[in-house]
Image: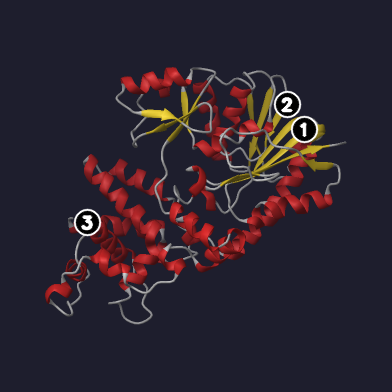
């Protein structure tokens, strides 16, 4: 374990978590790493280890900090470099002596005690459950209140694991069997996903952008949980569908495939730059029915012609992203409880906007990748209290999926997917 790679990890972490302080904004971890690798021509092994080091700190930041308090001055918070060093020693199964040396600290105790394996020593360091799971206190308390302590702990442990790579086969271009064969030819092992009927899961992370099958639009990178969202809307060929918070358009493309490329999909978002990517993705996927409309806000006059005309509306609302912590662990160090409350009111406004677009008899699907009740059930309850012309509609059954009453709920430790919530509503009149 070279000191140079530890320094690189520390510098990258400073960009992702400025000053190492919770609640501070920063760049997305995957983007920071991608930019660094593009600018520095490093070997594949070094790239893999550097990424592992950075993500280990992001996943286990709080437990690493608790471990380091043994030697740090009172009230001192470990900086990014110290966290990177601690993560490197843990990953390499090093000793407490090695950790102290790399931190520039004098060894205490000496002898066998000074050379104790750092993992065994760390396991004895007093930590709260929230520290051990590397969760902010406020988030741990909310998960316990909602799911109970045993379920919350299982969930927290799972959220610290790396997510797998899933693909959604584009049925406008290929079949699942055909994509599997193409991957085998490229020496990539993939197996069918257990819940999503057109999903594949890779046995290991591999670069896919250079494959002919990808360039020809045979598949999209998409978590299996996300693949289960579009089918909940039960779209049919010829319908008018609005994807109100389309982002980069992954679900719009899935909806187009489910509609057999017949009908009309209007994809809107306030992030014009992100929405613009959908044009190239649609062309590659062979999708012809998606039109994009950038918006300033959910009451933008551009939506006026669509009011009361959509057969189906998808509101995949911006949220805390708690369900995606396996992929984006940096989020838990940026979020604060007050932001969840702000999301709640934004989500309520977006659901109201989606309702205005829904025709009588039409369907309205509310979705988040959060696991918090305030962003999910509470938003739906508030909406239904103010909109008596809408009602909850039974969700389509998904084979093998645990049932969650009237709502669609995916918990990562139960389904090995990202976490999602969904509620299907229908307008009566």
185 or 38, nearer to the observer:
185
- Separation (CA) of disc 3 from disc 2: 55 Å
Does 27 appear above or below 117? above
Crowd rating for badge 2 (residues with CA inside 10 Å; few <14, some 14–19, many 20+): many
Does 202 appear above or below 113? above
| Image mark for residue 306 | 1
| Image mark for residue 240 | 2
Using residue 249 as the reference point, say whether residue 311 is left or right of it. Answer: right
- Helix, strand or loop for disc 3: loop
- Separation (CA) of disc 1 from disc 2: 9 Å
- Helix, strand or loop for disc 1: helix
Cβ atoms at labels 1 and 2 below 8 Å apart: yes
How far across and how far down the image is residue 202, in percent?
38, 33
- What residue is pinned by disc 3? 92
Crowd rating for badge 1 (residues with CA inside 10 Å; few <14, some 14–19, many 20+): some
Residue at position x 73%, y 46% in the image: 351
How far across and how far down the image is residue 406, in percent?
71, 44
Q: Earlier in the sequence, mark 3 or mark 1?
A: 3
């Amino acid at each position: 374990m070279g000191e140079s790679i530890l320094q690189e990890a520390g510098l990258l972490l400073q960009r992702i978590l400025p000053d190492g302080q919770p609640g501070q904004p920063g760049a997305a971890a995957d983007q920071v790493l991608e930019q660094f690798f593009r600018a520095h021509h490093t070997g594949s092994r070094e790239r893999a280890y550097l990424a592992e080091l950075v993500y280990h700190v992001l996943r286990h930041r709080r437990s690493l900090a608790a471990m380091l308090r043994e030697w740090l001055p009172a009230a001192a918070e470990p900086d990014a470099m110290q966290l990177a060093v601690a993560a490197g020693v843990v990953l390499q199964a090093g000793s407490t002596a090695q950790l102290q040396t790399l931190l520039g600290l004098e060894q205490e105790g000496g002898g066998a005690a000074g050379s104790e394996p750092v993992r065994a020593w760390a396991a004895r360091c007093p930590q709260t459950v929230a520290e051990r799971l590397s969760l902010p206190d406020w988030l741990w308390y909310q998960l316990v209140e909602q799911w109970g302590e045993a379920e919350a702990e299982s969930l927290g442990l799972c959220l610290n694991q790396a997510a797998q790579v899933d693909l959604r086969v584009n049925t406008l271009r290929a079949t699942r069997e055909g994509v599997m064969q193409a991957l085998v030819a490229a020496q990539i092992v993939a197996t069918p996903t257990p819940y999503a009927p057109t999903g594949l899961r890779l046995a290991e992370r591999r670069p896919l952008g250079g494959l002919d099958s990808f360039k020809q639009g045979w598949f999209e990178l998409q978590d299996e949980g996300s693949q289960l969202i579009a089918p909940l809307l039960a779209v049919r060929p010829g319908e008018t569908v609005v994807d109100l918070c389309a982002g980069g358009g992954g679900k719009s493309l899935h909806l187009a495939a489910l509609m057999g490329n017949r009908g009309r999909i209007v994809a809107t978002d306030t992030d014009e730059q992100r929405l613009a990517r959908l044009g190239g993705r649609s062309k590659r996927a062979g999708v012809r029915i998606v039109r994009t409309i950038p918006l300033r806000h959910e009451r933008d006059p551009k939506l006026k012609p669509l009011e009361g005309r959509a057969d189906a509306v998808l509101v995949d609302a911006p949220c805390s992203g708690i369900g995606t912590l396996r992929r984006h662990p940096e989020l838990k160090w940026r979020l604060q409880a007050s932001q969840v409350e702000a999301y709640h009111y934004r989500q309520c406004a977006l659901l109201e906007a989606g309702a205005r677009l829904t025709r009588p008899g039409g369907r309205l699907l509310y979705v988040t990748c959060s696991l918090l009740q305030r962003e999910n059930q509470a938003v739906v309850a508030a909406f239904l209290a103010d909109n008596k012309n809408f009602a909850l509609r039974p969700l389509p059954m998904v084979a093998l999926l645990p049932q969650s009453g009237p709502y669609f709920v995916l918990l990562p430790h139960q389904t090995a997917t990202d976490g999602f919530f969904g509620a299907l509503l229908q307008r009566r009149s």
